[in-house]
Image: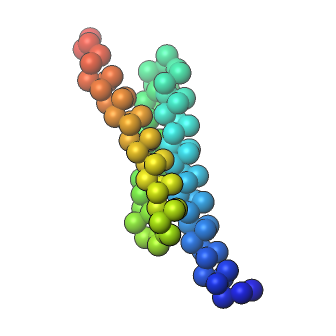
Amino acid sequence: MNPKHKALYPTTLRYQLIMTELLVAITYCRAAETTEDVLRKKRNIRQAKQAYRTAADFARRAPRPPAMRQDVQNKTDQLKSLLANFQVRTEQQPRS
């Protein structure tokens, strides 16, 4: 294997893992948006946050070229926006 490809391979795998975890987190947020079941909504949000933590942990330790970094940042921004919307909705709900 070409040394250039060998060095890129782990970076590409890390990038794919980070992006997959972010997409999983976004999917959990979307699932939480569509359910009326409060327990399921909370579980989906909790799982989204766990996937985000996993992605963030790998992102901190993984060197990425600028294009990959921008893709990760875009997905992270999208996810943070979704999670912030849940936080706002939770705070606005009347207490029983």
Q: Can you tell which quarter of the image residue 39 is in?
A: top left
The quarter of the rendered structure image containing the N terminus is bottom right
**Residue 81 appears at what percent x and percent y?**
38, 37
Which residue sits furthest front? Answer: 67
The residue positioned 51% from the left and 39% from the top of the image is 26
Q: Nearer the viewer, residue 31 or 47?
A: 31
Is 87 placed above or below 48 here? above
Number of numbered markers: 0
Check the picture and name the quadrant holding the C terminus: top left
Is 94 placed left or right of 44 in the picture? left
User: In the image, is 13 to the left or to the right of 83?
Assistant: right
In this figure, which colouring scheme has been used for the structure? rainbow
The residue sitting at 56% across, 63% down in the picture is: 15
Is any part of residue 54 visible from this angle? no
* Residue 57 in which image quadrant: bottom left
- With respect to residue 71, does 89 lie above or below? above
Q: Does the rendering let one see residue 69?
A: yes
Q: Residue at x 61, y 68 (%)?
A: 12
Which residue is painted at 57% across and 59% down in the image? 17
Q: Image height check: is 53 above or below 96? A: below
Q: Nearer the viewer, residue 28 or 5?
A: 5
71, 42: nearer the viewer: 71
Residue 95 point in image, percent of width and height: 25, 14
